[in-house]
Image (cartoon, helix red, strand yellow):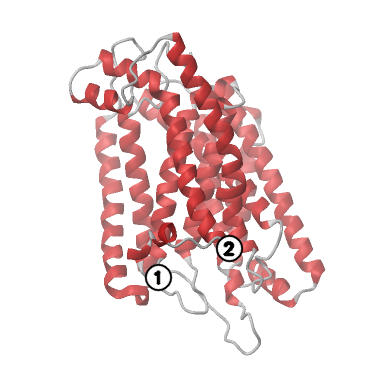
Amino acid sequence: MATKHTAFEFSPGFEDGRLRVAWYAFVGLLVAGGAYAAYLRLTQGMASTNLTSIVPWGAWVAFYIYFVGLSAGAFLVSTLANVFDVGKMHRIDRDALFAAIISMAVALLFVWIDLGRMDRMYYPFIWRQFTSALSWEVHAYVAYIGILVTELYFSMRIDLARLATELEGPRAKLYELLTLGRTDTGDASRAFDTRWLKRAGMVGIPLAIFTVHGGTGVLFAVSKARPYWNSGLFPVIFIISALLSGTALVMMLYVLRTRLFDGERVDADLLEQLAQLLIAFIVIDVALTAVEGLIAFSSLHPHEVETWLIVLFGEMSWSFWWFMVGCSWVFPMVLLSKRSWRRSPPIMTLAGLLVVIGVVAVRFNIVIPAQILPVMEGLPHGSYFPTLVEWATSIGIIGVGLLLFTIGAELLPLTPLAGGDHE
């Protein structure tokens, strides 16, 4: 957000007013198109999709697990500052936490649009099934969102209190409301916030790893009827790809917000730190995927081998080679290969964008291929490609996420104020 980092001046928002208008117009078109597609989904039901009893999970489920991973990865990046106190990472911890919250909201919208009876989304909280991994997962999401909101509150509470006292009018009242009545900015209050911020982060780490995104992997891994999913490595692969996409997202947001909102220079050292993390996660992701494929082919299990052949050489091969391998591994690694490039904001923004796009293909390659082959001999083969309604609703939901993040970035002190708690 645009802030001059002085004691009394705080002017959030785009540096360029014309860019603001163009951006909101673009996001508005996405949301409007998505709203119309959602109307078609509501009035026509599942007939508006290519989902069938053979392939019941499609684009919406792929995007759901994608945004859960994006959230978990962004949150884990924030813990480098809030739990492990890596100094320069404090510059991006609020961006990461806010992006994690918005990503979870988007993920839940994808779950909602996928439900056959969308009005029953609250049922898991009323009729609990303790033997259901999905039931546990829904409750874990609620706890996780609570942790994210708590961390973001303690991270920016001092700055919110300063703004509440230094500004006037509706904004001052908004910031005072967001402090929950805690407007003290003294050392004792600051120490209290720091202590509880770290505690919330420590609780959130196992929650994000083992129940939120690792748990999402478990939803697939426990499906014995689908050998391609029924793997102990699946939850681990989910976590690593979450870290990969989350790091890429935070790096991209850092550059764009610093340039377009703050009007400041990007910290090249911090950018290189994030780039090095990205390299590590790409290497681990490649290694785990290769191990998973090797285990599948070595098992000689017909269903598992045939599913991998669909991914590598069949109808999903374009997604695997061009997007998963190309966008999330090869092209970013080329851009990350030189130190001068790792310190270049435009190049790192492109690298982050490629990974964020590429990991979408990773999710599609998890969800779709295993459903194409019949689970029993004699059943028909499946086939699936999203309809225009599915694509449009997905783009509209993503537009909602972009809109929410932009509004938050224009209102909240996501950039620590001068002399604040991270100075």
Image quadrant containing the N terminus? top left
Point out residue 413 in the picture as x, y percentages from the top left corner: 36, 25
Q: Secondary structure at mark 2?
A: loop
- Residue at image location 33% in from the left, 15% down from the top: 162
- Please tell me how crowded label 2 is: few (under 14), some (14-19), or many (20+) other residues with Cα within 10 Å: few
Q: Which mark is residue 206?
A: none
Is 185 positioned to the left or the right of 364 in the image? Answer: left
Q: Label 1 amino acid?
A: Thr
- Return the residue at label 2: 131
Where 233 falls versus 165 (above or below)?
below
- Please tell me how crowded label 1 is: few (under 14), some (14-19), or many (20+) other residues with Cα within 10 Å: few
Q: Which mark is residue 387?
A: 1
Where 4 falls versus 323 (above or below)?
above
Do we see residue 323 in this rendering?
no
Is 339 positioned to the left or the right of 262 in the image? Answer: right
> Which image quarter: residue 411?
top left
Cα gap from disc 2 to disc 1, whole angstroms: 34 Å
- Residue at image location 26% in from the left, 65% down from the top: 39
